[in-house]
Image (cartoon, rainbow, N blue to C red):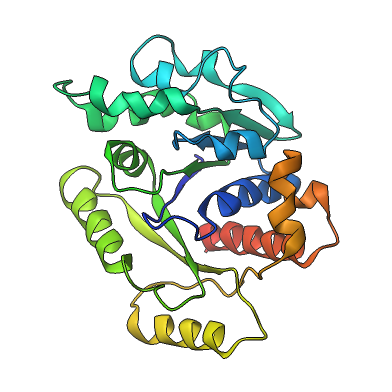
Amino acid sequence: MGRIIAIANQKGGVGKTTTAINLSASLASLGKKVLALDMDPQGNMTSGLSVDKNEVEYSVYDLIIGNVGIKECICEEVYENLDVLPSNIDLSAAEIELIGVENKEYIIKKEVEKIEKNYDFIIIDCPPALSMLTINAMTTADSVLVPIQCEYYALEGLSQLIHTIDLVKERLNPNLVMEGVVFTMYDARTNLSLQVVENVKENLDQTIYKTIIPRNIRLAEAPSYGMPINLYDPKSTGAESYLLLAEEVINKGEE
């Protein structure tokens, strides 16, 4: 049975989509069969994995409004071992279309159940908001992984996110757990990065991944080429870090 991990943080610009793209690609490069599921209307995970979000025949939006089944939406073998369920701006209308729909929190879950046995991992990129789309991701997921930027306001909003996870667990998905926190955009040259890491460790009763993702130019460039970092620049510190994170995620599941 595959593991379904939602990558979530309602704060934008924390490396959420970067983590979703590169964790998916790194897991695939380690021989795991992966589905990258894009729940963000911006569709950055989709284009960051070289799928043209404006040219796809079907997207998550079509799935949510019931136009098609999940198998028709999946772009297969975008890279070796990696399939993509794309998203685009159409998805921003889904919230409105779901008003009054029964069990709308479980639409994605019901569809994913049909194909989850085909994958070792399903990585869901959530939108940067605590919306119905995020709730759908959390009812589908086994766990939530939270990227946190190493900056002064890192903890702000985190308690809100943890509260949301607890609410989803209490009311919609009793099996949901906090996968853990991963630090992103770490700059070893600043004391601030170090202080943030220490501060979060002291104040947060959560699993914190050992791997810390550095601030890395190559990592920032990769999406504009529609490539994950392990293909764009496999020797970069960014690529090495996400590979280490993928290994940690795999090992955590095997414990």
Q: Is residue 168 above or below residue 11?
A: above
The answer, for residue 31, to whether it is visible in the render is no
> Which residue appears at 51% of the width and 31% of the height?
117
Q: Is residue 139 above or below residue 17?
A: above
- Percent position of residue 1, x then y: 49, 39
- Percent position of residue 108, x then y: 36, 29
The answer, for residue 126, to whether it is visible in the render is yes
Q: How many marks?
A: 0
Residue closer to the observer: 246 or 137: 137
In which quarter of the view is residue 12 placed?
A: bottom left
Q: Is residue 203 above or below residue 82?
A: below
In which quarter of the view is residue 250 placed?
A: bottom right
- Percent position of residue 168, x then y: 23, 49
98 to the left or right of 100: right
> Which residue appears at 53% of the width and 18% of the height?
73
Q: Is residue 22 above or below residue 150?
A: above
Residue situated furthest top in the rendering: 67
Residue closer to the observer: 164 or 89: 89
> Which residue appears at 60% of the width and 30% of the height?
84
